[in-house]
Image: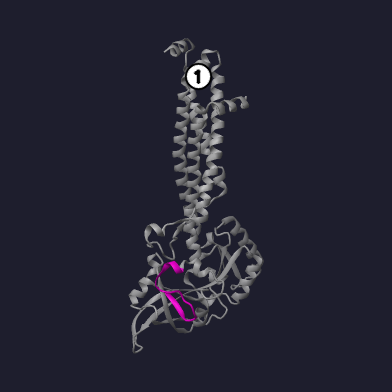
Amino acid sequence: MIRFLFKGLLRDKSRSRLPVIVVALGVMLSVFMHSYITGLMSDMIEMTAKFTTGHLKVMTKAYADNADQFPNDLAMLDAGKMKEKLATDFPGFQWTPRINFGGLIDVPDTTGETRSQGPAMGLGIDLLSEGSEEAERLNLAKSLVNGRLPEKRGEILLSDAFSKKLQVKPGEQVTLIGSTMNGGMAISNFTVAGTVRFGTNALDRGTLIADIADVQQALEMTDAASEILGFSKEGYYDNDEEELIARQFNSKYNTSEDLYKPVMQKLGDQRGMDTYIFMSESMGSIITFVFIIAMSLVLWNAGLLGALRRYGEIGVRLAMGEEKGHVYRMMIYESVMIGIAGTIIGTCFGLGFAWLMQTYGLHIETFTKGATAAVMMPDVVRARITVTDYYIGFIPGVISTIIGTSLAGIGIFKRKTAQLFKELEA
């Protein structure tokens, strides 16, 4: 029977070509939109991960308990050895040390007296080591407003709005006044190499970025770091995988009550990020659900119209003595075949377009003329293909088509055999 119906669909193009094309287009849009929204939500999480949380973070337990205060007196010692251990135990991640600190930026005049000054939040990252990806990870080159990136020790970047407030330009010298790891006063001179835009008011008001070696020297933190961040080489945060790694690490080092023992936290455990991830996933699911419902209605109506278009054919079959139930079942079977064929074709095309957008991305800076170039704003929008994309098209593609045909087919049971010949004569 299935073979008979399949041949019928192949030979009668009017019953199969247009419905399959409509289903394929609807499924293609559903698959592509789901991967696009997933990628968009992931980009928002990734920007936070790149700047503050990483996909994984290793700190001392004492530092983790007071992380919001950036207590560098509780920072991790022998950070270099810990980084090597992490690279050996978890080779699927890139590990990099960072130092978070605060201080006062003082700008001297030609006589050495204070010309202007303001509080700043500082970030020490690995800018100058060979092979370091920190500058690229933070999108520093494209976020430059004036000057250039630091090329040697003693050079820093300031947020552009902060530099304008202090009236300091690239090439001028500033002084960082803060506190050392041991509680003493730290005073160090730096040269402003350039200014960058972060894209958020909180960071643009007063932020500086310096090489971690300079910060370690200025704050007397030799081979110490506030935290060591881990970034998945796959480029995306996977909550289940990171949870497993964090448990494995903590079970290895959680052998004492030492406040300075290392602890690992995944992105979802930091600063309310679990709520942020839940909201992002929920928002993505809601948008995807609404779009799929819309496509389902379209395909539902396509199935409905397809069945109504065969009103005359059904009348002839009933007049020849075919049972109503048999006609109805045959229409459902045909809709299943059309739905499956259209879903497979649409899923292939949808995944193809999604792969192109995931690989090459959409460079939105071309449309915004550089207005989006900032540390905390992605300049390339990418899709992300997940396992869900391989089967999500079956919801609008198969189920909606069957429902549409089922509703339209109800009319079969309302047809009166005595009136069929009159209908056919008309």
- Residue 378 vs residue 81: left or right? left
Q: Nearer the viewer, residue 105 or 353?
A: 353
Q: Nearer the viewer, residue 133 or 402?
A: 133
- Compared to 274, does 121 lie above or below? below
Q: Nearer the viewer, residue 297 or 60?
A: 297
Q: Is residue 144 magenta?
A: yes
Indicate the position of residue 34 as horizontal and vertical percent values: 49, 47
Indicate the position of residue 197 as horizontal and vertical percent values: 40, 68
Q: Nearer the viewer, residue 247 or 315?
A: 315
Which quadrant of the structure image shows residue 113? bottom left
Indicate the position of residue 219 as horizontal and vertical percent values: 50, 81
Indicate the position of residue 44 as horizontal and vertical percent values: 46, 58
Q: Residue furthest bottom?
A: 111
Residue name at image x 45 percent, y 42 percent: 291
Which quadrant of the structure image shows residue 250? bottom right
- Compared to 212, does 90 lie above or below? above
Instruction: Quickly name the residue at label 1.
Output: 314
* Magenta region: 140-158
Residue name at image x 45 percent, y 50 percent: 283
- Observer able to see residue 291: yes
Residue name at image x 48 percent, y 62 percent: 48
Does dot 1 land on a helix, a strand or a loop? helix
User: What coloring was used for the rendering?
Assistant: one colour
Q: Amino acid at mark 1?
A: Ile
Q: Quadrant of the N terminus?
A: top right
